[in-house]
Amino acid sequence: MTPIVRVSKLDKYFDQLHVLKDISFEVAPAEVVCIIGRSGSGKSTLLRCINFLEQPDFGSVEVDGLVVQGGGHGREYRQQVHDLRLKTGMVFQSFNLFAHMTALENVIEGPMTVKGMSKDEAVALGMRNLEKVGLSAKKDQYPSRLSGGQQQRVAIARAMAMQPKVMLFDEPTSALDPELIGEVLGVMQQLVEEGMTMLAVTHEMSFARRFADRILFMHEGRFAEIGTPEQLFNNPQDERTRAFLSHLQ
Amino acid sequence: MAAATSDSTKSQAQLIYEQQRRRQRRFSTGVNVSYLVLLGILFLAFSGLQVNILGVHLKTIQLDWAFIVERTPFIFGGVGLTIILAILSISLACVLALLGALGRLSKFPPAYALATFYISLIRGTPLLLQIIFIFLGLPQLGITPGGMTAGVLALGINYGAYMTEIMRAGIQSVGVGQREAALAIGMVPSQIMRRIVLPQALKLVVPPIGNEFIAMLKDTALISVTGFVWEILWRAQKVGRANFRSLEALLVAAVFYWVITILFTMVQGRIEAYVARGDRTL
Amino acid sequence: MKRLMRLFFVVVLTAVLAACTSSEPADLLAKIEEDGVIRVSTDPNYAPQSFLDESGEFVGFDVDVAKEIGKRLGVEVEFVTPDWDLITAGNWGNQWDMSVGSMTVTVARQEILHFAEPAYYYTPAQFAASDASGIESLDQINGQPVCVGLSTTYETWLNGNKAELGFPESSFYAEAPTGVSVVPLQTDNECAQAIQAGRTEFSVFLTSGTVVQAAIDEGIAIHRVGSPVYSENLAVAFDKKSSLDGTSLVARVSEIIAEMHADGTLSTLSNQWFGADLTSDPTK
C-alpha cells in the first residue's frame, strides 16, 4: 500500500542546535504511529514539521501525494504549505481553542473561513463532530467555561471538521489533570476505530501500547528504535530505549 | 431560650462576615462624609468670604455670581460639541492606532517605517502645535478644513500615535497558540488577524481606550485656539474676556469638564465590567 | 490590494486636478454676490466692539457696522471667529472675506492686507494704571513695566518702532515713554484682568480708550493716565493673498463706508455703543 505520509531526510536546526537529524519514515493509511522519547529529543518538533508550523531546513514532507520541500519561500511555497495544512489536522498540548468563540464557533471557523462553506452546512458538520466527542450540549459554551478535557475534545472536533487525511497529536493529554485524561483518550480511541491515520507524540504509554501499530522512539534528533508495541515495550533492543522505559516505571 | 439558641448557632464564618460588612460600611460612610467636607472647602474657597480664625485673616476668591448665572447657559452650549469632538477624534484615533500597530508589527519595510515615523513625529511634537499646523498648514495645500475637521484630524492623529502602543500590546497579548491553531486549520495571516487576533485584542484594549477618551475630553479644549470651534473653553474665554470676568467663565468651564469626566468615568467603569464578565483565568 | 492602491491614486489625482482647475468666479465681489453671503471675521473678545450677548449672539459696534455693509452690498453676513493673530497675519485661505474688527491701519499690515478707505472710526491710544499704583501722569510711566495686547499697535509703539506704524505725524500726541519693559499678553483685556486679579508684574497698560472705558465701566479699579498718546485709524481689511481678486470688493466697501460717514449712520452707531462720536478723523 502506498504510504499516506512520507518524511524524507528531514533536518531542522534551532540556531546552532541540530534538533532533527536526517529523519525519514512513512505512515500507511489508517496506521497509528506513536512517537515517544525524553523531552528535548525532538519529537514535538518533528510533528510540527509535518504541517510546517516549524519549517524544516532540509528534506521533504509528503502527505497524500503532495510533496513540500523544506527551506522554501515565495508564493508557490506558501500555497503548498497551505494545501499541506488542509490535509493534516493538529491537536495541541494546550488545546488552543479560540478564546472568543463558543465551542461550535471554534469547530465551524475552519470550514467557513478556509473552505468557504455555508453557515448551515458548517453548523451541521460542526454539530456532527461535537456529537462525536460527546459535547453537543456544550456547543454554546466559551472555552473558559469548559474543563481541560472538554476543551481538548472540542479541539479534536475542530481539527476533524476540516476532514484531514491524517491527525497529528502533540502531547494531547499532558496538560490535563489525571482524572480528565481518560475522556480524551476515549475520543482518540474512537478515531482509531474509525480508521483515522494518526501520528501522536505522547507520554501515555497505555494508549501507545494498546492502539499503536508502530512506535518510534526518538533520542537526540534521531530514531533510536522503531518497532511494534510488543517489540518495543516487552523486548527493547536499544539500551537507550530500555533506560527510557525503566525510567517510566 | 430560643433566641439565645439561635444567636449561639450563628457560625463563626457568619460572625466574621458580618464584622467585615460593618467595617466596609463604616469605610464608605467615612469616604462620603469626607467628600462632602472637601466639596464644602472648595465652595468656601470661592465664596468671597473673608474670615478671621484665631487672628489669621483668610481671604477667599471673590466671584461675580450674577455673571456666572447669566453666562452659564451659553458656556453649557459647548458641552455637546466637546463630547462630539472627543467621540469623533477617538474614532479616528482608533483606526490610526490599529493601522499604526499593524505597521509596527509588519515585516514589510515601508509599512514599518511609515508607522514608526508617524509615531515618532507625533509623539515628538506638542499637540497644540499640531493643531495649529493642521489648521494653518493644510489651506496652503489647497485643502481648507473647517475648525471642527481640523480639530478632529489633529486630536485623532495625535491620540492615534499614542494609542498605537495600546493596540500593539493588545495584538501581542493574543497568545502564539491561537495563531498556531489557526494556521493548523489552514487560515492565512490576513484571516488570522481579522478573525482570531483582532477580536481578542480589541476586548483587551477597551479599558485603556476608555482612559484615553477621558483624557481627550479635556484636550479638546486646545481646539479653541483655532477660534472656529465653539466648544466649552472657547465660549468661556470669549465671554470672560469681553466682560473682564475670565476667572468666572473659566470656573464654569472647569465645572463642566469635571462633571463630564465623572460621568464618562462611570460609563467606562460599566464598560470595563461588561468586557470583563465571564472571564475566568485558566 | 494593488487595484485598491491604483484606485486611491486616481481619486487623489482627480481631487488635485479638480482643486487646480476649479472654475469659480475669479472676482471676490462677484462670488459674494453669487453666494448671497459675505463671511466676516470678528474677534468677540472686546465689548463694546464685538462680543457675545447672553444668548450667544454677536453684538457690538463692529458687528453692526459689518451688518450695515452687508445690507448695502445686498448680501447676508456670516460671522466667523478666528483668533486675532490669524486675522492680522493675512493669508486667510478664503475662509472668510473681510475683517470688520477695529483693525488699525499700519504700514506692516498694508503689506499683507488691503484696507478700505476711509477708516470707519478712530480711537485714541490711552494709558491706564491701577488705582493702587499711584501713577497719575505720563512721565511716571518711564521705567515701568507696561502691559499690552499681543500684536497690537501699542506693542509696536512702545517698542520704539513708530515708523512701522506709518501713521501721519499729526496722529501722535506724545513721545513713547522711555525705559519701559513691554509685557505682551494674549489680548488687551488680559491686562486689565491681571491688575484686577492682583498680579503685580505691572500696574500700567496701554490700549484703546474704548477698552479702558469698558474696564472702568465693569468696576475695575483703574484710571486713565494722561491724555491719549496717539490716534489710530480703524478700517475694514481684506486678504491680499486671496486666490480671488478683491479689488472690486475693496472699492465697493470703501464707497459704502464713505456713504455711511456722509449719511450719519456711523455717528449714530458710535454714539449708541461708545456714548461718543468717534467717527471723525482727529488729525483733520
Image (cartoon, rainbow, N blue to C red):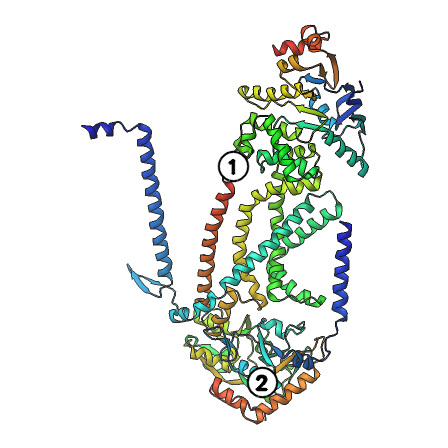
Q: Quadrant of residue C25?
A: bottom right
Q: Secondary structure at mark 2?
A: helix
Give the residue at the far top of this rendering: A235
Can residue C103 be seen? Answer: yes
Residue on which disc 2 sits: C71
Q: Quadrant of residue A117?
A: top right
Amino acid type of the residue tagged 2 in the rendering: Lys
Question: x and y percent of residue B81 in the render?
Answer: 53, 63
Question: x and y percent of residue B223 in the render?
Answer: 57, 63
Residue on which disc 1 sits: B279
Q: Nearer the viewer, residue B241 or B51?
A: B241
Would you place residue B121 above or below residue A151 in this image?
Answer: below
The structure residue drawn at horizontal position 59% and vertical position 22%, both measured from the top left corner, is: A184
> Numbered disc 1: what chain?
B
Q: Quadrant of residue A114?
A: top right
Residue B91 in the figure: left or right of residue A9: left
Q: Secondary structure at mark 1?
A: loop
Callout 2–callout 1 Cβ contact below 8 Å: no
Amino acid type of the residue tagged 1 in the rendering: Asp
> Numbered disc 2: what chain?
C
Residue C184 in the figure: left or right of residue B189: left
Q: Nearer the viewer, residue B44 or A206?
A: A206
Would you place residue C106 above or below residue B64 in this image?
Answer: below
| Badge 2: residue crowd in 10 Å (few <14, some 14–19, many ≥20) | few
Can residue A74 be seen? Answer: no
In space, the residues marked 2 and 1 are separated at their CA atoms by 67 Å
